[in-house]
Image (spheres, rainbow, N blue to C red):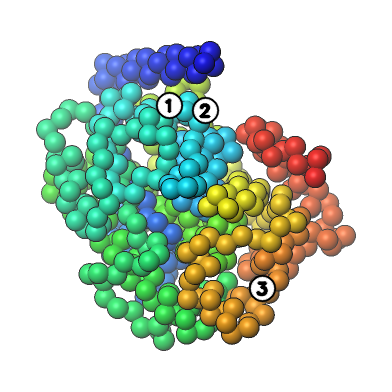
């Protein structure tokens, strides 16, 4: 009880500090932007028109990219819904904020009560806040919004938030807009059908009819998700908010197929990220800076002038990049931390990725790799099992299910991550270097799983 009282007191002190910052900004006459964080559910990196997909119909995202910045090396730090969203809203890795797995139903994971979340910090700084659609984090007081709108079709949800956007209120607003598309089961109402025969199959997936059928459904669901963004942009323009609103568009994790979602392989972590700063004259910019979704909260707080004096977050602001700064060599490394998806899926992994190499530490490597229920039941995976296939994409089934303690990949020569160099004596120095980086990251972020280096 004493610790809880202390944390509540600290929270009040933090709120007072934020209020003081907000008042100082107002006294200085600074105009703070409105903020929109648009989050899709299970959309892979290349699965949008502006990212080069030949069949993905995403006019909304394409338009946003044409007026903003499109990142080609943006990474979530946990390819699982609730954990990833907790990172988006705190700037803290899941092992630091406590949201180790899914929040809903029997999974029952929740962040620590004292986390400093984006909606709470912005509200304390004078912002109006609204969460539209999927919420999927806990506990509510730690991620509290002034208003909530339930999940509905994305275009209808955009109309539902119009009164919030258009309100005659001097305060800026923060809108967290969350679609449930393209999560399984794929919602396709209002989207044009896609021919399975024409669908390109990514290298990590098997080129079989069942997979093509699901990919076609997935692309139609992405189109439906994009309809919400397109309508939201129209509403921002119609209400006169377009020119004073910062928008960041991301997905929470990779595509809903084995080999992507719930993994720390590239298809699970490398995701779309498009951002628009209305004050920046540069448009249609493409950046290869390696940003992580732990950087989203610091960036948006930076725009709001609401960064706490002693922030808990572990990411950093990339506002300077959106305003034209050269990333140089400062944005060349990211880390990932995965522990659970469903409560039955204990499989902690830690990962470091540089421009060229990736090291994965499978802490529970003695266990078979666990499957999310929706991925196991997918037509794609069931067809692989029923056909008795030995490979899933370029990776053998045995390699996918039974993983070694360390996986080391040269992504320049092996972008599909199938040639593990961890046991190669020629790469022993590189392995040791990346292990040291990973351990230092765990020390910086107070990762409880750091003890597994010595105890297992």
- Which residue is located at x 57 percent, y 62 percent? 371
Q: Is residue 183 above or below residue 56?
A: above
Hey, which quadrant is residue 141 in on the image? top left
Hey, which quadrant is residue 30 in on the image? top left
Badge nearest the viewer, 3 or 1:
3
Mark 1: few/some/many CA within 10 Å (<14, 14-19, 20+): many
Residue lying furthest front: 106
- Which residue is located at x 29 percent, y 49 percent? 133
Asked whether the beta carbons under mark 2 and mark 1 sit within 8 Å of each other, the answer is no
- Which residue is located at x 76 percent, y 59 percent? 404
Q: Is residue 342 at all visible to an observer of this figure?
A: yes
Badge nearest the viewer, 2 or 1:
2
**Relative to 360, is 2 on the left or the right?**
left
Q: Residue 267 appears at what percent x and percent y?
A: 54, 63
Alpha carbon of mark 2 to alpha carbon of mark 3: how far? 40 Å
Q: Is residue 230 at all visible to an observer of this figure?
A: no
Residue hosting label 1: 307
Q: Residue 97 appears at what percent x and percent y?
A: 53, 35
Asked whether the beta carbons under mark 3 and mark 1 sit within 8 Å of each other, the answer is no
Mark 3, secondary structure of its residue: helix
Q: Residue 263 appears at what percent x and percent y?
A: 58, 58
Residue 397, numbered circle: 3
Residue hosting label 2: 312
Mark 2, secondary structure of its residue: loop
């Amino acid at each position: 009880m004493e610790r809880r009282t202390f944390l509540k007191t600290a929270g009040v002190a933090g709120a007072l500090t934020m209020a003081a910052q907000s008042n100082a900004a107002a006294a200085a006459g600074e105009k703070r932007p409105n903020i929109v964080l648009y989050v899709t559910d299970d959309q892979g990196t290349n699965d949008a028109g502006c990212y080069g997909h030949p069949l993905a119909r995403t006019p909304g995202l394409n338009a946003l990219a044409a007026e903003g910045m499109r990142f080609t090396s943006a990474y979530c730090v946990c390819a699982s819904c609730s954990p990833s969203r907790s990172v988006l809203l705190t700037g803290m890795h899941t092992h630091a904020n406590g949201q180790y797995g899914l929040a809903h139903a029997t999974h029952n994971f929740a962040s620590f009560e004292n986390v400093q979340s984006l909606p709470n910090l912005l509200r304390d700084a004078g912002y109006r806040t609204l969460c539209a659609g999927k919420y999927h984090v806990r506990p509510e007081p730690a991620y509290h919004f002034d208003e909530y709108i339930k999940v509905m079709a994305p275009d209808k949800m955009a109309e539902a938030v119009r009164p919030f956007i258009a309100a005659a209120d001097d305060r800026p607003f923060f809108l967290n807009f969350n679609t449930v598309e393209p999560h399984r089961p794929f919602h396709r109402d209002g989207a044009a059908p896609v021919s399975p025969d024409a669908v390109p199959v990514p290298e990590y997936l098997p080129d079989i009819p069942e997979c093509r059928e699901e990919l076609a459904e997935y692309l139609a669901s992405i189109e439906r998700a994009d309809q919400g963004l397109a309508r939201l942009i129209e509403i921002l323009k119609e209400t006169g908010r377009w020119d004073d609103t910062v928008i960041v568009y991301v997905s929470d994790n990779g595509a809903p197929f084995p080999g992507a979602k719930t993994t720390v392989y590239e298809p699970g972590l490398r995701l779309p990220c498009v951002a628009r700063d209305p004050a920046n004259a540069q448009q249609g910019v493409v950046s290869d800076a390696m940003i992580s979704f732990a950087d989203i909260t610091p960036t948006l707080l930076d725009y709001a002038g609401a960064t706490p004096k002693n922030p808990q977050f572990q990411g950093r602001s990339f506002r300077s990049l959106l305003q034209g700064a050269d990333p140089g060599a400062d944005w060349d490394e990211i880390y990932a931390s995965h522990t659970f998806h469903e409560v039955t899926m204990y499989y902690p992994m830690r990962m470091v990725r540089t421009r060229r190499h990736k090291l994965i530490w499978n802490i529970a490597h003695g266990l078979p790799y666990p499957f999310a229920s929706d991925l196991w039941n997918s037509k794609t995976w069931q067809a692989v099992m029923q056909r008795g296939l030995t490979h899933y994409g370029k990776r053998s089934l045995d390699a996918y299910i039974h993983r070694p303690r360390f996986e080391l990949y040269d992504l320049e020569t092996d972008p599909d991550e199938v040639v593990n160099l961890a046991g190669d004596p020629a790469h022993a120095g590189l392995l040791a270097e990346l292990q040291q980086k990973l351990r230092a990251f765990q020390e910086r972020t107070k990762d409880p799983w750091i003890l597994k280096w010595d105890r297992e």
